[in-house]
Image (tube, rainbow, N blue to C red):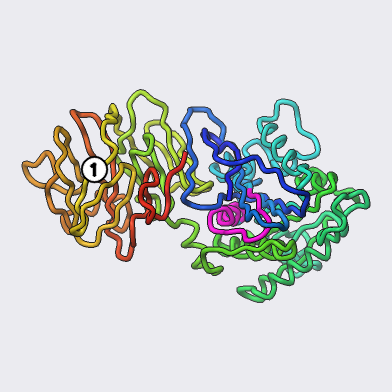
Amino acid sequence: MNWGCGLNPGMLKWVRGDTCSMKKRLTIIVFAVAGFVLHLFFIHTVYAAAPLKFSVHHLDSHAPGATVLVVGGIQGDEPGGFNAAALMATHYKILSGRVIVVPNLNFPSIVKRSRGIHGDMNRKFDTLGPGDPESETIVRIKSMIQDPDVDVILNLHDGSGFYAATHVNRLRNPGRWGQSIIIDQEIMGPGSTKNTTPFSNLARAAATCAKDINQQLLEPIHRFHVKNTHTASGNKEMAKTLTFFALKHQKAAFGIEASKSFPTSRRVYYHLLAIESFLTQAGVGFERSFPLTEAGIRKAMDQDIALSLGNKRVLVFAENVRKRLNYIPMEKGRDIQFAVNHPLMTLVPQGDYFSLFHGNRQLTRLWPQYFEYARGLEGIQMVVDGEEQSIFFGSVVSVKDRFLVKHIPDHRVNIIGFSRQKASNESGFVVRRKNFAKRFSMDRAGRIFRVEVYESGKFNGMILVDFRPGNGAVKLVNRGNNPGGKKQFYQ
């Protein structure tokens, strides 16, 4: 698996990845919001007016087969599509062929929960006005669509109501879009260089996808249908879209529409069924790390998500995080650098505080306390449940019963929420869960707490102690020094 280059709207300053040159083979591009493994982190710097740019994620089996590119988030108020894409990037392994995921195509609009803060991005693929603020995004994604290796584009949407070929009622009629596979025409044009692929007959491939989904419906009324917009026959609106642009450049393209009548997890369920059908039709092998159920999807979307600050010295474990976190140590006099381990997460400055977003959900507000940073230490020595451990700053360590921070000469340890009278330095004390005041926890369950280290008033770093039952080994480890850790930050 490789991470492709791409800037995350507003703040991205990273990129880990290879430029892909593929042998000529079937390629499906699925436009969606995503990133492959959660242990890879995006590195950002917060600037007041920096635009959030989309990211590109390459899931490569290094084995022969089709390449699938999934795109989501072209319209920011359709969370089913961009969350499905994000799960593709973070929880799927490709066994043959390749998948390319563009998860957060319109990231600024995702954060704002807007269809399009600069107009509908999916109506900008025919002509683009001079000075359009989204021109760079459109140019980039058009270039990806026209890549010679690309055969198929999947554009993920959430649509109104339930499409039906004949009028049933207000929510179920030909004017609705939900629960449909969208095609612009029945077959690829004769000039297509890809017209021998399984997707040359667009109607047949879409019908196969709908049939596959309909075998796994949660309720019979959720049935999927194929909706042909007959774009070339005078549909001026659809002629402006991403999928029709792809068709004009001899690339098969499909829209996938889950109903806006559903909660997000149910929309994601149907999106993933559709994507998996197209992967199977393309001959792309895959496996996912969670059960394809609504409960499994809800858990996977938020599992082990985290934010790192201050060159990985501060960690915010964002799963079940409190709505407000106070006195987060940030470096005085510098732009705020941060890293996240999920392509839908970003940090947005808002006056005196920072909002941490996961897609269009504001997870928490971080109220900073500014310090000079001291960088002489890289971590601390702890005794955790009777075992001595070396723990790097910016890590989370699992505790079943008790822990102790060993004394550090000329440094002060502050265990947030633990108080020992007349002790300004809290190293050397055995600490259990019952010794904490729950209101100082990072999470709403009162199980995750901060341990901070200071030197002459300067901040050294933080680790988190995790008292959650069954939390296993260390979950997030800085600098890759604990092979048992589930995730790591990368630059």
Q: Is residue 170 visible?
A: no
Start and end of the magenta stretch? 81-101
Residue 420 higher or lower than 210, as above or below: above
Residue 202 higher or lower than 136, as above or below: below
Q: Please tell me which residue is depicted at 46% across the width and 44% down the height of the picture.
A: 340
Q: Is residue 209 visible?
A: yes
Residue most toward the right?
190
Q: Please tell me which residue is depicted at 66% across the width and 76% down the height of the picture.
A: 220
Residue at mark 1: 380
Could you tell me residue 275's position as x and y percent? 67, 61
Quick check: is 277 in the magenta stretch?
no
> Mark 1: which amino acid?
Ile
> Dividing the picture into quarters, in which one does residue 85 lie?
bottom right
Could you tell me residue 226's position as x and y percent? 78, 64
Tag 1 secondary structure: strand
Quick check: is 90 in the magenta stretch?
yes
Q: Residues within 10 Å of mark 1 (few under 14, many from 20)?
A: some
Locate residue 247 relative to residue 387 in the image: left or right: right
Residue 98 higher or lower than 299, as above or below: above
> Dividing the picture into quarters, in which one does residue 245 lie?
top right
Q: Nearer the viewer, residue 429 or 108?
A: 429
